[in-house]
Amino acid sequence: MRLTEEANVREGEYEVALRPHGLAGLRGAVFVIINPPRFQLQVSIRPRDEVVSVRLGAVPGPVTDVDAMLPDDLNLRSVKRILVRFKDFMPVSILADERELLR
């Protein structure tokens, strides 16, 4: 996880690096960072449902839940990373490699 400013946990990016062929055949995976009392971030990848879900927010406090669809023409065998960029605890971009998933 990289923050724009170390003191500002509301803005930055979170990268999930995947093994080669990491998404192919995967039922699902969840990646979580919780740093009370500052923030929580969860990225759920469900290739069979064609969804990447992001949950982000303060601890304690309200969270934002966002789902992004994996495109039908995305080659799951080639995806090496999922990158979530966020500002004010709101995902502004979800990338599979360089391909934008958030619309």
Image (spheres, helix red, strand yellow):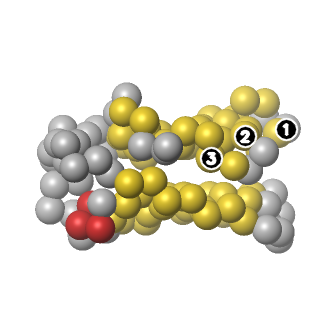
Q: Residues within 10 Å of mark 1 (few under 14, many from 20)?
A: few
Quick one: label 2 or label 1, which is nearer the N terminus?
A: 1
Gap between marks 3 and 1 measured at Cα: 19 Å
* Residue holding disc 3: 91
The circle drawn on residue 87 is: 2
As helix, strand or loop, the secondary structure at mark 1 comes to loop
Gap between marks 2 and 1 measured at Cα: 14 Å
Indicate which label's residue lies in the foreground, 3 or 1.
Answer: 3
As helix, strand or loop, the secondary structure at mark 3 comes to strand
Q: Residues within 10 Å of mark 2 (few under 14, many from 20)?
A: some
Residue at 28%, 38% in the rendered image: 80
Gap between marks 2 and 3 measured at Cα: 7 Å
Q: Residues within 10 Å of mark 3 (few under 14, many from 20)?
A: many
Quadrant for residue 34, please give it.
bottom right
Residue 94 placement, left or right of 92: left
Tell me whether the residue at label 2 lies in contact with that at label 1, contact meaning CB atoms closer than 8 angstroms: no
Residue 54 placement, left or right of 99: right
Measured as percent of width and height from the top left, residue 71 is found at 29, 47
Tell me whether the residue at label 3 lies in contact with that at label 1, contact meaning CB atoms closer than 8 angstroms: no
Amino acid type, callout 3 = Pro
As helix, strand or loop, the secondary structure at mark 2 comes to strand
Amino acid type, callout 1 = Ala
Residue at 62%, 46% in the rendered image: 91
* Residue holding disc 1: 7
Measured as percent of width and height from the top left, residue 102 is found at 49, 44
